[in-house]
């Protein structure tokens, strides 16, 4: 069984002391590929180094909406150059809108639109962060489609209501569920998980944040995407193996990831043991 964690941040300092051991654990859990998101272009050297170090790790470049006050034409040019500078860059992002933690809406929308243009021009998917901004973000995507053209991508760490989920499904987007789908009170996320078509479903950790039950409160890591997969499979009434196959195929389709075999990741043969 193979799993793909479609959103990680293992370049953060919290992984500095045990990254090799963390990798051993994600391989033992069946995680064969990972997509590393990007908060600011300053991260590029560390992301490229990780991609060169770990054959299963791919990455994105982008500017997070909470960093939108840094947006300039010069930064846009830098991002576009970076997006074409490494063969393992598979997406633009994470970008999007966050009206929960910041009120600079026009700056966020400007940076988001420019990154959509970049993704469209380079034919790469976008990784979208959306918090308390679903209506505005959906409107901006519809406007982009009308004025510029189609763009593909994923609503990452999705926490919206089923109605909002449908907006983005109607726009052709994938929906990615994180450890929040395992939280007892996350009923609207669980309902969204149940209505998402099987060919538009992804899983992630967003590590080191939002560790799933039964690891809640601990540092999150890619191995724990297994717990996300188990919960999503339970909510959708399918086997873990079926869910793993569906989400792995979806991740490879969206991000253009290569197929892997068991020999590419020898620890996959080890059994998964819950602590």
Image (tube, helix red, strand yellow):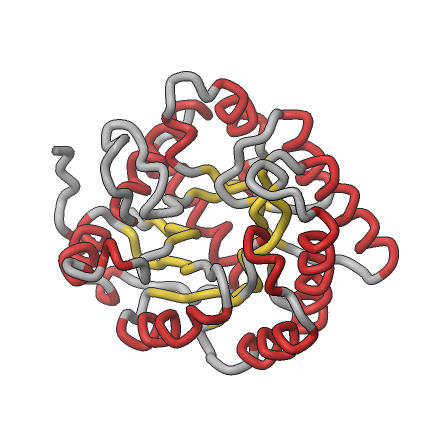
Q: Position of residue 218 (x, y in %)?
A: 23, 37
Instruction: Report the residue that reaches farthest toward the right.
Output: 147
Of the pair 77 and 241, the residue shown nearer to us: 77
Residue 44, relative to residue 148: is it above or below? Answer: below
Residue at image position (29%, 47%) is 1
15 sits left or right of 148 in the view: left
Residue at image position (45%, 45%) is 247
Q: Position of residue 262 (x, y in %)?
A: 24, 60
Residue 228, relative to residue 45: is it above or below? Answer: above
180 sits left or right of 103 in the view: left
Residue at image position (70%, 74%) is 73
Of the pair 73 and 16, the residue shown nearer to us: 73
Q: Quadrant of the C terminus?
A: top left
Of the pair 133 and 215, the residue shown nearer to us: 133
The picture quadrant where one finds residue 68 is: bottom right
Residue at image position (30%, 34%) is 227
Q: Position of residue 256 (x, y in %)?
A: 51, 65
Residue 239, relative to residue 138: is it above or below? Answer: above
Query: How many marks are shown on the rendered structure?
Result: 0
Residue 145, relative to residue 51: is it above or below? Answer: above
Q: Position of residue 144 (x, y in %)?
A: 80, 55
179 sits left or right of 152 in the view: left
């Amino acid at each position: 069984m193979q799993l793909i964690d479609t959103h990680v941040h293992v370049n953060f300092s919290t992984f500095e002391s045990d990254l090799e051991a963390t990798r051993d654990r994600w391989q033992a859990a069946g995680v064969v590929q990972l997509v590393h998101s990007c908060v600011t272009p300053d991260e590029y050297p560390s992301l490229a180094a990780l991609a060169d170090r770990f054959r299963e790790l791919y990455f994105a470049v982008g500017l997070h909406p909470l960093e939108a006050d840094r947006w300039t034409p010069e930064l846009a040019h830098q991002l576009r150059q970076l997006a074409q500078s490494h063969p393992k860059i598979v997406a633009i992002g994470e970008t999007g809108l966050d009206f929960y933690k910041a009120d600079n809406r026009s700056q966020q929308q400007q940076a988001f639109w420019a990154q959509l243009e970049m993704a469209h021009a380079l034919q790469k998917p976008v990784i979208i962060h959306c918090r308390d901004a679903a209506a505005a973000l959906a409107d901006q995507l519809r406007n982009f489609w009308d004025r510029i053209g189609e763009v593909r991508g994923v609503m990452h760490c999705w926490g919206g209501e089923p109605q909002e989920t449908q907006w983005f499904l109607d726009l052709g987007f994938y929906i990615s569920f994180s450890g929040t789908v395992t939280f007892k009170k996350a009923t609207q996320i669980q309902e969204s998980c149940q209505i998402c078509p099987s060919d538009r479903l992804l899983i992630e950790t967003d590590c080191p944040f939002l560790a799933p039950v039964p690891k809640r409160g601990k540092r999150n890591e890619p191995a724990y995407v297994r717990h996300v997969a188990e919960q999503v499979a339970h909510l959708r009434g399918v086997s873990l193996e079926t869910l793993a196959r569906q989400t792995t195929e979806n991740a490879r389709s969206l991000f253009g990831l290569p197929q892997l075999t068991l020999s590419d990741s020898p620890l996959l043969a080890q059994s998964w043991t819950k602590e």
